[in-house]
Image: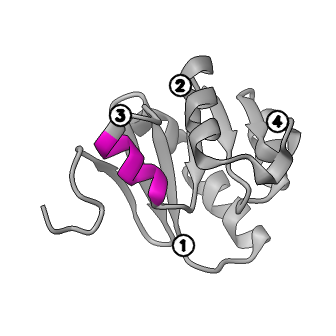
Amino acid sequence: MKFLIDAQLPAKLAAFLKTTGHDVVHTSELQRGNRTTDTIIATLADREGRIVVTKDRDFWIGHLLDGSPRSLLLVSTGNIANAALLQLFIDHLDDVVTLLSQSAVIELGRDRLVAHTDRDPSGEN
């Protein structure tokens, strides 16, 4: 799979995903680095067929309202140590990849992995 990792997530996550054979770009590698806007990230991800990996729920709202980014992995762990975050990905990567092949939006939490249908991220709809 092809991923674009947002700035709030560590470059170590991108490095780990690369070691598992995925095509990964971290925002720090982009021309504007970690200052790249959400709009540019979503546009780039869509153009290159990448899944945006982020903690930023604004991407989900953009997905719902504008259809961009087309695919999204929302990390919903709150504050978490990098080592614990990497362990979550190690433990659940196979399931993440399977769900992303079936759903445009999935959410990874400390104790859950959920494939979402298009609905309001606030849970109101």
> Which badge, 1 or 3, is on the more N-terminal residue?
3
Which amino acid, mark 4?
Answer: Thr
Mark 1 vs mark 4, CA separation in Å: 23 Å
> Which numbered disc covers residue 67?
3
Left or right for 103, reference 80: left
Q: Position of residue 47 (x, y in %)?
A: 58, 19
User: On the image, numbered disc 4 is attached to which residue?
Assistant: 19
Q: Is residue 31 visible?
A: yes
Q: Which mark is residue 46?
A: 2
Q: Secondary structure at mark 4?
A: helix
Name the spot of residue 40 as percent of width and height, x first. 64, 37
Location of the C terminus (image quadrant)? bottom left
- The kind of secondary structure element at disc 1 is loop
Q: How many marks?
A: 4
Q: Name the side, left or right, on which 57 lies relative to 87.
A: left
The residue under label 1 is 77
Q: Amino acid at mark 2?
A: Asp
Disc 1 vs disc 3: which is toward the camera?
A: 3
Query: Is the residue under label 2 in contact with that under label 4 (CB below 8 Å)?
Result: no
